Image (tube, rainbow, N blue to C red):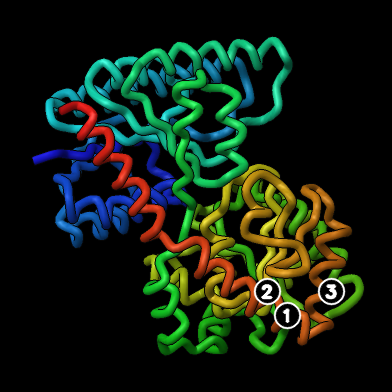
Amino acid sequence: MRRVIYAWNYVEWGGAQIHFLALIKEARREFDVVVVLPKGTDSQFHHVLNALNVECVEFEPAVDLAPTETIFDRFRRRRRRLKSEHHMISEISRIGTQNAIIHTDLIPTQSLLSLIRLCRLTDVFITSHNALPQVSITRWYWMRWKFYVLSAFGGVRVFCTNKHAAEYFKKLYAKKVANRITITYDSINPEEIEGARASDFDRSRTLSELNIDAKKFIVLAVGRFIDRKGRWTFLDAAKKVLSQCDDINFVWLTPAIPSESDRIEIDTYNIGDRFHLVHASSIGGRRDDVLRFFRVGDIYAQPSFVEGLPISLLEALAIGLPSISTNVYGIPEAIINEKTGLLIEPGDPDSLAAAILELKNDPDLRRRLADAGREHVLRSFDEREAARIAISEYKRAFNARQ
């Protein structure tokens, strides 16, 4: 039987894993599916794969994604990445690739040699979620050389999860690869969304258990509490809003426990219990728990600096939350300013504060944006369509071998 091997080397639960899961759910209906992933991956993800009867193969170590501060830290992280990728590829080789394809999200700038090794085994699909940060012209050409080298392998195929990323990577890959870049959107599961909307959910009780005043207007964010998600812009805006009105709380749901230095930095904003950093485990932590938790919010705000097309934003829109986000990367494909949500520029707490207050003070605008945003996401970002496109490309790759 034809096999699809999905492989990655990080343990953090986020949009990339959710995207792969959407493909896996449909691919298993037509292919033998194996997932190669590092030890330490969230147990919930294993639970979902087990429920789907998908085989998992583990390796170690996982790549270290923590920020680096010194040359030694960068060297140590690079060494760990190489070791992680080597062990991942060793497991793939052990599984066997004679009648298989590989789907990963490694990228040539960091993992060129590993991708070449995979290409020597079989056809390789690469998913890229967002454009890379701007670099000098010298570094740009160095990056481009790496993409051109990988393009020389005929079995390379590229998926991008939004139009912005697709246009960016077309400039890096050689023409024969660039011309067949395919968009498989980051997306939502409509059935899960409708289940979350229809389920019994006691908003007041949920907030009360978290010591959050349910009578106040709630601005919600969901995702890792990290710089690229705009965490300090969020808090700067919160402080500005609270200086103008008192009946509002800010809540950020995160899958990772913040560091002590993060907590110290949060305290410097002096907004006390008006900001609540909620760990996902305190609400149950399962996917359906997170989706239901969106319903505590009156509006959603995600002031990211670097994003492809964040699934948490798509979920907020699909749940029916009027949303604010930034005019970067793929986000404008989901939020059309003043039609399906409000767009601001990244790193602009004044604009974020103004947008929050505008939505808070205008219930009609909230209803209009909520309805339009939900309709847009359900129509344009259905994970079944992304999976259909991916599976069609898998079949094309298998058929090309015959």
Mark number displayed over residue 322 = 2
Disc 1 vs disc 3: which is toward the camera?
A: 1
Distance CA(mark 1)–CA(mark 2)? 6 Å
Q: What whole-number distance in Å separates the C-alpha atoms at marks 1 and 3?
A: 11 Å
What separation in Å lies between label 2 and label 3 (alpha carbons)? 13 Å
User: Looking at the image, do the residues carrying marks 1 and 2 touch, with CB atoms under 8 Å apart?
Assistant: yes
Say above or below: 152 vs 301: above
Residue 337 pos. (x, y %): 76, 62
Identity of the amino acid at label 2? Answer: Pro
One can see residue 36 in this view = yes
Q: Disc 3 designates what residue? A: 357
Residue for badge 1: 366
Q: Which of 33 and 214 is in front in this view?
A: 33
Left or right of 179, for residue 138:
right
| Disc 1 + disc 3, Cβ < 8 Å | no
* First in sequence: mark 1 vs mark 2: 2
Residue at the image point whose x is 47% and y is 58% from the top? 187
Residue 198 to residue 265: above or below: below
Label annotation for residue 128: none
| Residue located at (73% from left, 80% from top) | 366
**Callout 3: few (<14), some (14-19), or many (20+) C-alpha neighbours within 10 Å?**
some
Tell me residue 32's x, y (percent): 14, 45
Amino acid under disc 1: Arg
Q: Please tell me which residue lies in front, 132 or 145.
A: 145
Residue 273 visible in image? no
Say whether residue 231 is left or right of residue 199.
Answer: right
The quadrant the C terminus occupies is top left
